[in-house]
């Protein structure tokens, strides 16, 4: 029997090619390829306006943006972070010679549990690096309160949180800095790319130096900066993607609602719940498979794979089990019970604008069959 066509966990959104050609013609005519060219300048302004933030600095990718954010705030010593995230979150600490201190997550939000932060603070702690996992906002108020009390900085890994609002306000306005990723797999993509959200022009200035080798002007180098610049090709595709973002977000929402309707009646499965005050971006569709479910999470993963549906177990295995982290005292599994349980239960289902109803039905059918 021939296989049905593959369905992947995501498919990057691309605007119509003919809409991109005029941008390319302008790049060819100007020969401005990088170093803060016209598209780069336009995209910084357009994104700040769209996202509802004061300033942002574009980057070649989210990981370099995270590494640079730590440099910009001179973070050192120990940083409190979550193990339930993508590798880049805590790797950005190791690249700065900072020791990650893992703290368990809240089982509902999958985000850093504010209740557990204070007990992890030591004299060496300088900052907190939480993640708005799957685009669900962290408890920003309580994190801010703890940070203010102990004199810590807060850098949000907001790689999943493009366009997310809480109470009508951008979630990216919280913390000292927030970092976005525009990787191909994210809600908004520039093929590769990222940004640091900056609350004021001064910190943006410093970050702009740091992403360009530390150059403040032609002859003055003020820091051992890196090359983190986004090029004009990325900035141009970003400007075009932004024109289509509302369609992308509403298509994602509709797909998520169809999954919700399909699985609502199954008590051994649950989808992410989102507070009413949050305008979510439906960045991912994590499905949590309880131990009492007919099939185990891994059996469901294999059943989907046999149907040529390639779901992903984000975030399994936990970062804290990677060889470069697992000997840290804070990486001990029994201290991270919630994160370990979520990592054992989660499976992220395909969600992307071009997933059509019949393809989604194939996914739903396999999941429904697994409950018997
Ligand atoms: C994607 C991602 C990153 C890294 O972004 P890149 O642009 O791929 O470098 C960082 N943190 C999280 C949580 C991510 O999902």
Image (cartoon, rainbow, N blue to C red):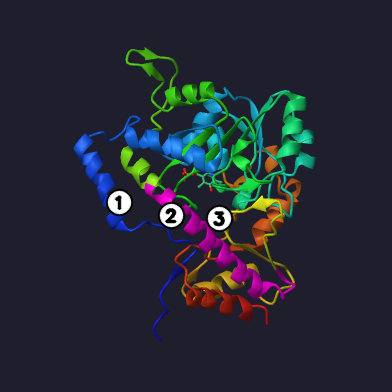
List the residue tagged with mark 1: 20
Res 307 seen here: no
Image quarter where the N terminus lies is bottom left
Kindly identify the residue that appears in the image at 74 percent across and 27 percent down.
148
Kindly identify the residue that appears in the image at 30 percent across and 54 percent down.
19
Of pointers 2 and 3, the one earlier in the residue sequence: 2
> Which residue is at the front of the view, 33 or 153?
33
Secondary structure under badge 3?
A: loop
* Whole-number angstrom distance, CA of label 2 to CA of label 1: 13 Å
Instruction: Residue 242: say if magenta.
Output: yes
Kindly identify the residue that appears in the image at 36 percent across and 56 percent down.
15
* Whole-number angstrom distance, CA of label 1 to CA of label 3: 24 Å
Left or right, 21 with respect to 195, comes to left
Using the rendered view, name the quadrant where residue 143 is placed. Answer: top right
Count of numbered tags: 3
Coordinates of residue 74 in the picture (x, y in percent): 57, 22
Some atom of ligand 1 lies within 8 Å of the CB belonging to the residue at label 3:
no
Q: Is residue 91 above or below residue 255?
A: above
Secondary structure under badge 2?
A: helix
Instruction: Residue 217: say if magenta.
Output: no
List the residue tagged with mark 2: 244
Report the span colored magenta: 240-269
- Number of other residues with Cα within 10 Å of mark 2, as a class: few under 14, some 14 to 19, many 20 or more: some
Secondary structure under badge 1?
A: helix
Of pointers 2 and 1, the one earlier in the residue sequence: 1
> Which residue is at the front of the view, 284 or 167?
167
- Name the mark on residue 283: 3
Mark nearest the camera among 1 and 3 is 1
């Amino acid at each position: 029997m021939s296989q049905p066509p593959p369905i992947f966990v995501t498919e990057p959104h691309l605007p119509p090619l003919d809409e991109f050609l005029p941008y390319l013609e302008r790049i060819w005519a100007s020969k401005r390829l990088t170093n803060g060219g016209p598209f780069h300048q336009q995209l910084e302004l357009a994104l700040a306006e769209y996202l509802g933030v004061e300033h942002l600095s574009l980057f070649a990718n989210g990981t370099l943006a995270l590494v640079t954010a730590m440099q910009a705030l001179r973070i050192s010593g120990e940083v409190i972070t979550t193990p339930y995230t993508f590798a880049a979150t805590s790797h950005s600490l190791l690249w700065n010679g900072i020791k990650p201190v893992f703290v368990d997550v809240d089982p509902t939000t999958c985000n850093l549990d504010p209740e557990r932060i204070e007990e992890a603070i030591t004299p060496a702690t300088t900052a907190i690096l939480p993640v708005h996992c799957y685009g669900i906002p962290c408890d920003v108020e309580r994190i801010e309160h703890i940070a203010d009390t102990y004199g810590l900085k807060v850098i949000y890994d907001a790689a999943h949180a493009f366009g997310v609002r809480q109470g009508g306000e951008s979630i990216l306005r919280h913390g000292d800095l927030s970092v976005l990723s525009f990787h191909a797999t994210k809600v908004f993509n520039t093929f590769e790319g990222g940004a640091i959200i900056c609350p004021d022009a001064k910190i943006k200035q410093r970050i702009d130096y740091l992403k360009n080798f530390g150059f403040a002007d032609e002859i003055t180098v003020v820091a051992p900066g890196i090359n983190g610049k986004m090029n004009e090709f990325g900035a141009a595709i970003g400007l075009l993607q932004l024109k289509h973002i509302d369609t992308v977000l509403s298509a994602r929402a509709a797909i998520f609602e169809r999954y919700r309707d399909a699985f609502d009646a199954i008590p051994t499965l649950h989808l992410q719940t989102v507070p009413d005050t949050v305008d979510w971006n439906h960045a991912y569709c994590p499905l949590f498979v309880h131990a009492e479910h007919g099939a185990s999470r891994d059996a469901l993963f294999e059943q989907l794979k046999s149907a040529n549906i390639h779901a992903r177990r984000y975030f399994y295995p936990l970062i804290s089990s990677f060889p470069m982290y697992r000997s840290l005292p804070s990486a001990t599994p029994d201290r991270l019970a919630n994160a370990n349980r979520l990592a054992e239960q989660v499976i992220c289902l395909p969600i992307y604008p071009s997933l059509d109803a019949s393809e989604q039905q194939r996914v739903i059918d396999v999941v429904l069959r697994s409950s018997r």
